[in-house]
Image (cartoon, helix red, strand yellow):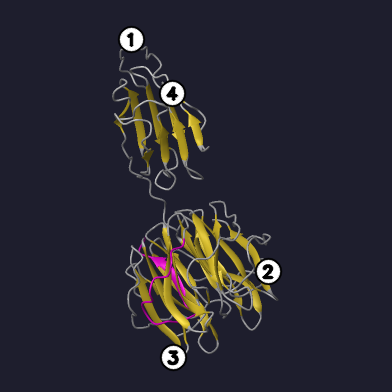
Amino acid sequence: MSGKIVNNVFRASGVIAATPGGLDWSTAVVTGSTLSASAGKGYFINTTSNACTVTLPSSAEIGDQIVFADYARTWSTNNLIIDSNGNNFQGDPDTYTVDYSTAGQSLNIVYSDSTKGWLPVSDDAVADVGVAPATQRALFAFGYTGSNTSVSNLVNSSGVVASDTTGVGTARRSAAASSYGGDKAIFAYGYASDYVSVSNLVNNSGVVAADVSGVGTARSGLGSSAYGGDKAIFGFGSPGGTYVSLTNLVNASGVIGADVTGVGTARFGITATEYGGDKGIFGFGFTNSESLTGVTNLISNSGVVASDVSAVGTARRYAAAAPYGGDKGIFAYGNTSGGGNVSMSNLVSNSGVVASDVSGVGTAREHPGATNYGGDKAIFGFGNSGSVTGVTNLVNNSGVIAADVSAVGTARDQVKAAGYSYSA
């Protein structure tokens, strides 16, 4: 038992209910869609995968008590639903709908009498006080030098890029990458000799693992972002001949899910970043109507992609994006049809609002990679300015891009990057 309720109360029979052992908590976490609850019990309810309908005892006595706790802080996504099983709940008959939909909530109910029935004596939401450590290090990997490559370059917590690490996995270009699990990374999809859907996990020491067989539609030119604190999403891109808006979710263990039907304008050469600490945003790209766009699509903290948000900033393709400042994001660089390569940037607020263009800093280029590092900063690197390059540009925690840092590592474009490691 992990808690005690010690108040003795009179049952309808006049006998005092004994409470020497306190409330009896169920040792099994409830994950199913239904539960038949018993008086004198406490239940941890996990609604990560589905809502849970709890049926209360039909023959309740005064003083019967039951407690429910939001095990995974997911009642706001999938509710706890109460079926009072013929008894009243707060004086309302069983025909009323009773649900609880606040993340982190706990519900303590006691049966009063036939008039009021079950009464909540508390239904408080407990604050989520734990804050995950910030990602400290990063790596750039894969890309195109004139031929596909799988080399990688580690980035330390000060933003210093290391020399090449011998490549692991299928050499390819125009893949996508994201952090997942809080301190690890995943690279997936891209173009080798054809479109591929293989993925490569990166552990919290920055070691890239061998190929994992593909899940989802093989494609290139897609974007990826972390979301939900420990998960990731891949979305959009081209499987050849057309552009799509489908997405694939990645769980906290780095497993990619099957295709999810697309939302928003299908496009290629898109990019994405996390913002708000647990949400993401896809932006920019090249549409099936052969036009550049600056539209964006927000990603909720449960991985749901929203419809198009009207473009802000110069429409372009082959940009890059990264989180910075702990809860904000930045899009930068890319290619415009009439203006060629650019170095302009667009900041993203912690509520997902994209700001207008900020004058460019650094070498104008397309196809760079970008990621967060050092807890609250970002880095853009590599790309094509008319020829492939390895220059990098650091971004401080206010979203200001610094001048070029001389190239380290093999110059290449269509490279991707992601953050990893809680250790500096």
Q: Nearer the viewer, mark 2 or mark 4?
A: 4
Tell which circle, 3 or 4, labels the residue nearer the N-terminal end: 4
Is residue 15 within the magenta segment? no
Amino acid type, mark 2: Thr
List x then y, in percent, for residue 233. Answer: 52, 61
Range drawn in magenta? 305-326
Residue at image mark 1: 16
Q: Identify which amino acid the numbered label 1 is placed on.
A: Ile
Numbered disc 2: secondary structure: loop
Q: Which image quadrant for residue 99?
A: top left
| Secondary structure that dominates the magenta span | loop
Give the mark, 3 or 2, whose residue is nearer the N terminus: 2
**Most foreground residue, 386 or 118:** 118
- Using the rendered image of the protein, determine whether residue 158 is visible from the camera's viewpoint: no
User: Please, what is the three-letter code of the amino acid marked with disc 4?
Assistant: Pro
The residue that disc 4 covers is: 57
- Circle 3 sits on which residue? 339
Three-letter residue code for mark 3: Gly
